[in-house]
Every structure is written in structure tokens, then in C-alpha cells.
Image (cartoon, grey):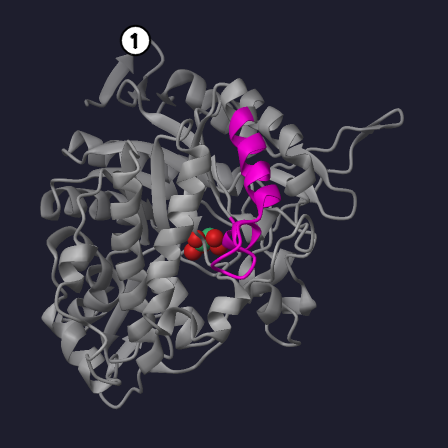
Amino acid sequence: MTATTTATRGTGSSKMVFPDGFVWGAATAAYQIEGAVAEDGRGPSIWDTFSEVPGNVADGHTGGFACDHYHRYAEDVRLMAGLGLAAYRFSVAWPRILPAGAGQVNAAGLDFYDRLVDELLAHGITPYPTLYHWDLPQALEDAGGWAVRDTAARFADFAAVVHERLGDRVGTWTTLNEPWVAAFLGYCSGVHAPGRRDPAAAFRAAHHLLLGHGLAARALRAAGAAEVALTLNLAPVVQTDDGHEEAARVDALMNRQFLDPALRGRYPEEVLEIAARHGGLDHIRDGDLAVIHQPIDLLGINYYNPSFVSAAPGEPANPAFPGTEGVRFEPPTGPTTAMDWPIEPSGLETLLVRLSRDYPEVGLLVTENGAAFDDRLTGDVDGDVAKDRVHDDDRIGYLDGHLRAAHAAISAGADLRGYLVWSLLDNFEWAYGYHKRFGIVYIDFETQRRVPKDSALWYRDVIKRNGLMGE
Ligand code: FCB
């Protein structure tokens, strides 16, 4: 694939064109948008339980209603079609399909995704399902969650059930979304469900998530899946002083703990050494790494910002990064989003180029990139009709910058196949509840009205041109 930059004569500007067939889309996740948590036989997930505990989620918000996408999916697909999306990444709620995590299949749950996939295809949009975006059935957590090995096998069973129903219409299957977050925010810092604070359990969870990925990839492949993918949260780790060991350590924990087993069949030495000090390594059995190291077609990359670290002797470990004693995580110094995350588009270029260099056998897809800002409806009305807009120039700037970085990475040889913006809709942003708006479409949560933001209209034009105008 090639990316081109052509000067447009007379305008003094140049056009950045993406390769033919570049996949443009948007992403969401089940618990963040669906609502309808007690409908049609869905069982409880760890996020239902966690968000009901006061203090876990801002203002006691839960995903109970969210964007009501479960009922409004057809309207949402029409919105996507209006924006010209070629791809839609969503996740399948495990507790809708297997309410107790294993055993009895709930046909009504499968029916929902069946309808969604048909609706997408009828509008010319390719479905990109993710099988695990953090909503573990509560029954499995009660049996030990990802800290126990059996959960990996149950995940592969779930993958096979979903494939059996949708495999005739879905080509690309993503196993996990961000296993680092599921393991270390869920089982170590406890800011995500299930809210445990146990470093040993977190390393076990990470391994069992990877094992679940391998087992599910194998099951999907055996059932005839055309493409199998794994999505990781990845970020360059930049050391702000003269050292490099601290950045290398954080890189091993955050990035290579997942990249290397999945794509090279081994753990980084630093990770083994740290995990050994936090509960030992007896959960890693002979043959596991061969299972985890399944050939995959696509690596999904969720990129938001780089991490900045420095050496700080005496500093205790970061609660989400056991093993980071003596490392300071530096606060951002430049511009930030409403999450206080630094805005650093060049990090995406660095990351994509590195991945294609270090793991050349796998194609790359940006499965999430985007930003939360304090969006406001303009409040415009025309007669009795709301003509509300959302002028989110800051989001347009963020997306534009990151797409330029992606384009530069392709020009430098990265095998990037597509870009999915996070997110299609404002949604339940985990521990932040509904306060952080990442959507290119605004949701009025009181009325469930959808209002495409200026960024959505801008993105529609990017897709139409397959690129960006000007510099
Ligand atoms: C990612 C998650 C996604 C969303 C964005 C902002 O870590 O995968 O669900 O919360 O961050």
C-alpha cells in the first residue's frame, strides 16, 4: 500500500491521500453504549456489579441505560451510513450470549448481534466485532475471574458460539480489547471492574487473558474465520531525563508484556522477573506460550498518548504498574484533553513505525484513537426545531493531527490498513461515567437525541476524499 502527498497547484496546499482500500470507521463497546442490561435474558457482568458500588464510578453512573443502542441500533447504523463509514467496531457482550458465562446459550442475545450485523451489511458497513471489551459475566468473576485459568477456556467457548452464529457474515474477529487495562486496572489498581487490588492476581489475569486470546484464535480459525486480530493499548514510553532503564521497564510492562507473547511466543525477561516477585510464575505452564503465539492477521492499536517517565529513587510503584519502584510517571506539560491526557500525535507515528519494524509479519489497524473534550450543544433552534450543533474544533484538531501522523507512518513503511475513531457516540466512559465525551456524535442522555458534532461532518469529508486537505 502506498500513501501519497500531492501538491494541489495554485492553492499552496497539499493533499494527503491514504492508500486505496484504507479502512475508515468508528468504534464502540457493548457496556458503554447498549444499556438494556436486564433485558432479553442478559446476565450481570462485572461492570454492572462494580458500577453499582458507591464511589466506584463518578456520580454513581452505570451502564444501565447508556445510549440505549440496544433499541436504537438501526438509527445508529443509519448515522454511520450518513457519515460514510466503511467499518464499525463494536463488542459482543458475553453476558448476553452466556448469561452465566458458560453453559446455557441465550438465543435472544445472539439475535441482537445478528440484527446488528445484518443492518450494517445492508448499509454497506463491514462489522468488526471484538469478543471481550471488559464485561466479564459476573458468574465467572465469582469463580475467580481472569485470575483463574478456567476463564481462558470459557472465553474460547464463547468465541466459538458467537462465530457459529455470525461467522457467515463476519470476516475479521478481534479476540480481546486492551488486556493490560483489564488485568492491571481491574485486578491491581482496582479502578476498573472487578475492582481488585492484588498485583499477583493481575499478572495471572494478564496471562490468562493472553491464553484466552490464543485459545479463542485457534477456535475461530478452526471454525473458518477469515481474519483474527488482537487489540492492545500501546504507547511509546519516553524518558525525560538522561536514563533509559525506567522507560524500558514501563515499555516491557505495558507494551511488550502482550506484544511479545502474542507475536513472538515469549515474555520479556523484565516482565518475568517482576511477575516472579509478585506471586510467582506457576500459572505459566509448559505449552502456554505456543498457544498464545497464534498467527494473527491484524494487530489492533489503541493509541491515545505517550507515557513520560523519569528515574526517581525511593518512589513507590505506580498502583497500576507493579514493579515500577523508582519510576516517576511525569504529568503532562503541553496541551491536554478533558481526560488530562497529553495531545501528542507524533507518538502515533513513532508507535506504528516501531511496530512494523519489530513485528513485520502482522498488519496494523488503529482500532481506537480520539479525545474527550467539554462539548456543548449550541442551543440553536429554528422555529420549534432544534438545530443544535457542537463546534468541537479541538477534537477536529486532535483527529487531524493523528491522521497526519498515521499518514507519515505509512509513508515511512508502516503497514497500516485502517483507522477507527473512538468513538462513534458519547458513552459511558468507565469510572468517569458520562462526564467524558469521546463521541463524534453527541448524545443528549436525557432524551437520547443524537447530534453529529462538527468533527463527524469533518470526518465524513475525510472519508469521502480518502485523505486530508492542505497542511
Ligand atoms: C480505551 C477503551 C475504550 C475507551 C477509551 C477512551 O482504553 O478501550 O473503551 O474507554 O479508552
Residue 71, percent from left and from top:
69, 38
Q: Residue furthest front?
A: 104
Residue type for callout 1: Arg
Front residue of 55/217: it is 217
The answer to whether residue 346 of the structure is visible from this angle is no
Tell me: 401 left or right of 140.
left
Residue 273, percent from left and from top:
14, 79
**Whether residue 178 is situated above or below residue 112 in the rendered picture:** below
**Whether residue 112 is situated above or below residue 139 in the rendered picture:** above
**Whether residue 28 is situated above or below residue 239 in the rendered picture:** above
For residue 307, which quarter of the picture?
bottom left
Give the quarter of the figure containing the C terminus.
top left
User: Overall secondary structure of the magenta stretch?
Assistant: helix
Front residue of 37/253: it is 37
Q: Residues within 10 Å of mark 1 (few under 14, many from 20)?
A: few
Q: Is residue 96 magenta?
A: yes
Residue 64, percent from left and from top:
68, 57
Tell me: 65 left or right of 428.
right
Q: Residue furthest right?
A: 384
Queried on whether the Cβ of the residue with tag 1 lies below 8 angstroms from ligand 1, the answer reads no
Q: Residue at x 15, y 61 (%)?
A: 289
Front residue of 291/361: it is 291
Front residue of 356/267: it is 267
Q: Which residues are magenta?
A: 93-118
Q: Residue at x 58, y 41 (%)?
A: 425
Badge 1 marks a residue whose secondary structure is loop
Q: Is residue 189 magenta?
A: no
Task: Identify residue for label 1.
Answer: 9
Residue 253, percent from left and from top:
24, 68
Tell me: 333 left or right of 413.
right
**Whether residue 386 is situated above or below residue 435 in the rendered picture:** above
The answer to whether residue 95 of the structure is visible from this angle is yes
